[in-house]
Image: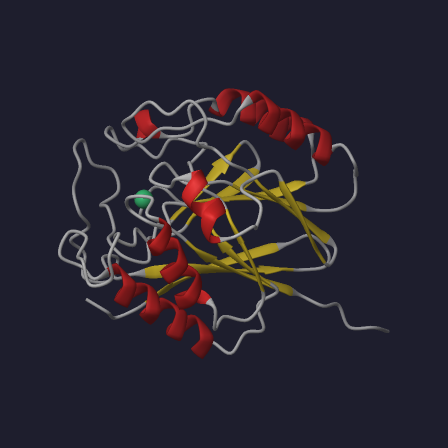
Amino acid sequence: MAESTARYLLQISDCHLMPDAGQRFRGLDTDETLRAVVAHAKGLDIDFDHVLLSGDLVHHGAPDAYRRLLQIVSPLPGSQHWIPGNHDERAAMRAASERPLGRELVRCGAWDLLLLDSTDAPDGRGSGSLSASELEWLDQTLAHSHERPALIVLHHNPVVTGSAWQDPIMLGNADAFARIVDRHARVRGIICGHLHQHQALRLGQVPVWSAPSTGIQFKPGQRDFMLEDDPVAACPGYCVYRLSEEGGIEASVHRVEAR
Ligand SMILES: [Fe+2]
C-alpha cells in the first residue's frame, strides 16, 4: 500500500522591512531578524512545498525593501507566494515581482490553498476588508470541489482575540467572510498574520492560526497597544503547517533567538 504523503507549508509574516537596509523598526533590524528566521527554518530540514508570505512584508511600501525581502527569503525551499497587508503597497509589490496579489489558487497535493488580498477599504488605522470580487472569487473557487480540503490564507484576522485595541482593526467584513466559509465544509483551516502574536482560534468549526511577526511581537489581550514582554513570546517567529493527505492540519510555531 502506498504511504500517504504529508505536505509542508512555511508561513512568514509581518516582516516590516524598513525602506533602507540597516534602518531599525522599534529598535530592531528587521532585515536581520528575517535572515535569522530564514536560517532557522532552513535548519529544520523540511522540504517545504510552499512558502506563504502573509503581509506587512515591508513597513513603508518601498520597492527596494521588497527586492531585499525576496533576496533574503530566496534560499528557502518551496514555491513562494505573497499577499499584501495594511502596510504594503500593491504597486511596489508589482514592481518587485510578477507574482499574484491575492485571488491565487495553489494546488498542494490533495489540498487547495486560497490566498486572499484583505487590504480593500482600509480604515487608516490598520483594518482592511475583502473586496466584493475577492469574496465572490473565494465562494466560486471553493464551489469547484466538495472533496478537496482547503486552507485559506489572508493578512487580517477574521475573528476577535479579546484585545480591545486590535479587535477594531481586524478583518472589516468578517461576517461576509464567515458566511462563505460556513457554506463550504471543505475549508479545514484559515491562517493569517496582522496580530504579531501566535494565536490558535476558531471560526465556527474551522481552526484559525495567526503567525508571529518575524520581528516585533504585540502582547495579546491588552486594552492599549503594548509590545510583548514575555522573553520567549517576544522573539521573532514563524509557523509551519503539516497537511495530511486525509485533510488534517498540524500547526507549529517556532521562535528564533535574535534579539
Ligand atoms: Fe504587521
From where the camera sits, is residue 54 visible?
no
From where the camera sits, is residue 139 visible?
yes
The residue drawn where x is 59% and y is 54% is 249
Q: Quadrant of residue 109?
A: bottom right
Q: Quadrant of residue 110?
A: bottom right
Quadrant where the C terminus is found in the figure: bottom left
Side (left or right) of 81 relative to 84:
right
Residue lying at the far right in this picture: please name it: 1
Residue 2 image point, x, y percent: 83, 73
Residue 96 image point, x, y percent: 46, 52
Q: Nearer the viewer, residue 201 or 178?
A: 178
Tell me which image quadrant ligand 1 sits in: top left
Q: Quadrant of residue 162?
A: top left
The coloring applied to the image is secondary structure
Side (left or right) of 47 relative to 58:
right
Residue 80 drawn above or below residue 218: below
The residue drawn where x is 57% and y is 68% is 48
Side (left or right) of 224 relative to 2:
left
The residue drawn where x is 39% and y is 39% is 89
Q: Nearer the viewer, residue 58 or 226?
A: 58
Q: How many marks?
A: 0
Residue 143 image point, x, y percent: 76, 32
